[in-house]
Image (cartoon, rainbow, N blue to C red):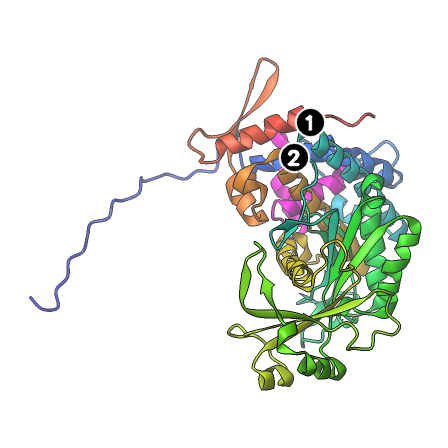
């Protein structure tokens, strides 16, 4: 009969009766991995030393432990300080955790001097984590571009806008018409670690040289001495970092034994447009994709000598890429007329040693991964700030960077395969938020992961690798 249809029977789910009187079962059991890793890298003890003077004499929770618990909570997906309840109400797994009021008081007592010492403590923990990686595995992984490994380390700087929906100190209108903060951040592309960041008002300039210098110096201070000196360090930014003062600072770092190289975006100005129009077709070369294959519809040319770069560091080169715009790309009037999208960057990498325009272009395009780092960071503390006070929010940002480090160290030291490169949301869904049963036997507390959990073996293996890590002395 026309218009009739059949409904396929769907199996019903098992009926359940819900009560709130369970015992011996804990949630977010995998987050214990982060807490133990903070201990194993010396982060907890370093924080305790730094924050010890803030502890009431002989009373209360250890301030360093409170800071680590906050960082673990943020890494686990917490968005407000009240989310500490997830850890606090499962004392069988996480031990004694401070109350919300105690955590608030600690954050309110941290000033700029203490915050600087927190950064130093995080740097000491990073050095231990990297030594553990060198002993247990192959150490710090190399960044690849154009099918080649880049020597040394790669630092990516970028700013982002964080919208605030309530009145907070030093928030301001942003250039995109919003309202909030405009933090500047630096990530290590090799491992995804969140090296440094500074909280700024929403109207802070995107290309402020002083802010870029401060964040870069903070990031370099996070690197162990053995990597900060004697290792090539590539610094990538978009056009916001293309100020002569910032580039001069990068060059001056070489005088202190830090082998810095820059690759920064540059605005397409009228002199550059004139130079692009005069480049012969024979000097345009096919661009490369990240795997080293040719990039369809994209070409690269060098404009060095065709554009005045007076005032820039000696040896600065200027390179342009043109390609067919993808749907939705924002085009300038020049791009619209030419029918191609143009992007320009500066670098001081010489031609000798393989610094061809094609390779340098694909190396610079790798800076786009910082957007993924920021997006993940906003999912781990950087997207919301809890207080009306700027100083508290600045401390929250530092703890968010610590949370990002704990996730990166977990992947570097304890995980393999897909989970070693997974984003925080996937790690939480598969590992950190798993429920488990807590049992005691033989003077031992056991965390029993359900035998039906798909990633039980990966989580158990991570805990076993954690126990095998070399422990810091003292």
Residue drawn where x is 57% and y is 35% of the image? 29
Q: How many residues crowd mark 2 within 10 Å: few (<14), some (14–19), many (20+)?
A: many
Q: Which residue matches tag 2? A: 413
Q: Is residue 427 above or below residue 253?
A: above
Quadrant position of the C terminus in the picture: top right
- Judging depth in this view, the residue of 136 and 352 nearest the camera is 352
Residue drawn where x is 73% and y is 46% of the image? 402
Q: Element under label 1?
A: loop
Q: Is residue 342 above or below residue 183?
A: below
Q: Which residue extends farthest left?
A: 1
Residue drawn where x is 58% and y is 41% of the image? 420
Quadrant position of the N terminus in the picture: bottom left
The range drawn in magenta is 65-94
Q: Is there CB contact under 8 Å for labels 2 and 1?
A: yes
Q: Which mark is residue 469?
A: 1
Judged left or right of residue 473, residue 320 is left
């Amino acid at each position: 009969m026309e218009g009739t249809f059949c409904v396929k029977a769907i199996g019903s789910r098992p009926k359940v009766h819900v009560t709130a009187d369970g015992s011996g079962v804990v949630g977010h059991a995998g987050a214990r991995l982060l807490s133990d890793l903070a201990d194993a890298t010396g982060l907890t003890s370093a924080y305790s030393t730094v924050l010890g003077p803030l502890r009431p004499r002989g009373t209360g929770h250890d301030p360093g432990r409170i800071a680590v618990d906050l960082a673990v909570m943020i890494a686990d997906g917490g968005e407000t300080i009240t989310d500490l309840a997830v850890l606090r109400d499962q004392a069988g797994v996480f031990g004694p955790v401070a109350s919300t009021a105690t955590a608030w008081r600690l954050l309110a007592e941290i000033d700029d001097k203490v915050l600087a010492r927190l950064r130093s403590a995080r740097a000491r923990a990073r050095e231990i984590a990297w030594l553990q990686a060198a002993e247990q595995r192959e150490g710090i992984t190399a960044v690849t571009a154009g099918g080649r490994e880049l020597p040394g380390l790669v630092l990516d700087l970028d700013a982002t806008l964080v919208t605030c929906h309530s009145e907070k100190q030093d928030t301001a209108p942003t250039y995109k018409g919003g309202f909030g903060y405009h933090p500047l951040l630096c990530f290590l592309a090799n491992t995804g670690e969140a090296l440094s960041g500074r909280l700024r008002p929403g109207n802070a300039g995107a290309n402020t040289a002083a802010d870029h210098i401060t964040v870069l110096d903070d990031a370099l201070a996070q690197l162990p001495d053995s990597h900060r000196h004697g290792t090539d360090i590539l610094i990538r930014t978009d056009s916001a970092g293309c100020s002569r003062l910032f580039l001069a600072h990068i060059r001056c770092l070489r005088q202190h034994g830090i082998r810095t190289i820059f690759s920064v975006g540059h605005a397409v100005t009228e002199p550059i447009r004139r130079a692009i129009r005069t480049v012969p077709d024979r000097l345009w070369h096919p661009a490369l994709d990240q795997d080293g294959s040719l990039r369809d519809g994209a070409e690269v040319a060098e404009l060095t000598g065709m554009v005045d770069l007076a005032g820039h560091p000696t040896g600065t080169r200027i390179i342009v890429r043109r390609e067919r715009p993808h749907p939705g790309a924002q085009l300038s009037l020049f791009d619209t007329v030419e029918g191609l999208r143009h992007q320009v960057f500066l670098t001081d990498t010489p031609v000798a040693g393989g610094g061809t325009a094609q390779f340098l272009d694909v190396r610079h395009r790798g800076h786009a991964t910082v957007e993924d780092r920021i997006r993940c960071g906003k999912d781990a503390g950087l997207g919301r700030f809890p207080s009306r006070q700027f100083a508290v929010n600045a401390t929250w940002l530092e703890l968010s960077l610590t949370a990002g480090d704990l996730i990166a160290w977990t992947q570097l030291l304890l995980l393999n395969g897909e989970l070693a490169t997974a984003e925080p949301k996937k790690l939480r869904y598969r590992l950190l938020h798993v429920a488990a049963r807590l049992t005691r036997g033989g003077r031992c507390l056991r965390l029993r992961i359900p035998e039906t959990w798909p990633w039980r073996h990966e989580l158990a293996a991570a805990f076993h690798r954690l126990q095998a890590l070399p422990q810091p002395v003292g």
